[in-house]
Image (spheres, rainbow, N blue to C red):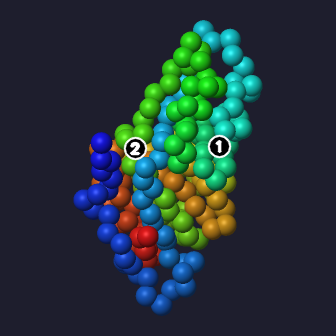
Amino acid sequence: MTSISPLNNVYVLGSFGNFEGKSPDEIITIKELKNYKIFQVVKYKTSKINIKECKIFDLGFPDNLKVSGNNDTRILWAGPDNWLIFSNSDNLSEEITKNLSNNEFAITDMSHSKAIIELSGKNLKEVLKKGCPINFNDLNKNQSINSIYNGIAITMDFVNDQPETVRVMSLRSFGESLYHSVTDASLEFGYKTT
């Protein structure tokens, strides 16, 4: 089966907006993340498992609004007893099967259901404020939130503080609209797609 990117029809490489005469750190960098394995893990209400004892690739399941991660995998808290696991490892499914029981967790493969856009740059939070009602001043590296961006339901994963980097995810069917909203909000600062 061939995987087609959610942004296949709209993603264009280049520099756009007010980028001329600016240093690279002043420009927003935008890139689509593709071919990630994505699983939702929900602990059943009847489960007796202590989530603190569960690990995926030696990563624990984080508490409210937190993320645990390494170079290949990130586990995002998505709600009470609910997590999203993102990985570029081909062995994620096997790792989940080995460490989490179907009797204790609802495990759903969502790998082709999300559009993921990574943004970075010092004006990143200003771009996000244009479409999202969250107070971004209180959010830092390894935190995640669910919100909206110009009416589109999103999950944000704050990957780094230096440079500020966030991954914004939406359902695949809203990917193009999210991309247009984010790039439009970035024009003021200038942006480049990589």
- Whether residue 151 is visible here, answered yes or no, is no
Q: Neighbour class for label 1 at 10 Å: few (<14), some, many (≥20)?
A: many
User: Percent position (x, y) of residue 136?
Assistant: 59, 55
**Judging from the image, what secondary structure is the residue with disc 1 in?**
strand
The amino acid type of the residue labelled 2 equals Lys
In the rendered image, which residue does mark 1 sit on?
67
Toward the viewer: 83 or 37? 37
- Whether residue 29 is visible here, answered yes or no, is yes
* Residue at image location 60% in from the left, 32% down from the top: 95
Task: Of the two numbered discs 1 and 2 on the same chain, state the one appearing first in sequence.
Answer: 1
User: Percent position (x, y) of residue 49?
Assistant: 69, 16
In the rendered image, which residue does mark 2 sit on?
114
User: Percent position (x, y) of residue 13?
Assistant: 36, 72
In the displayed structure image, the side of residue 190 where residue 88 appears, left or right:
right
The amino acid type of the residue labelled 1 equals Val
**Judging from the image, what secondary structure is the residue with disc 2 in?**
strand
Q: Quadrant of the C terminus?
A: bottom left
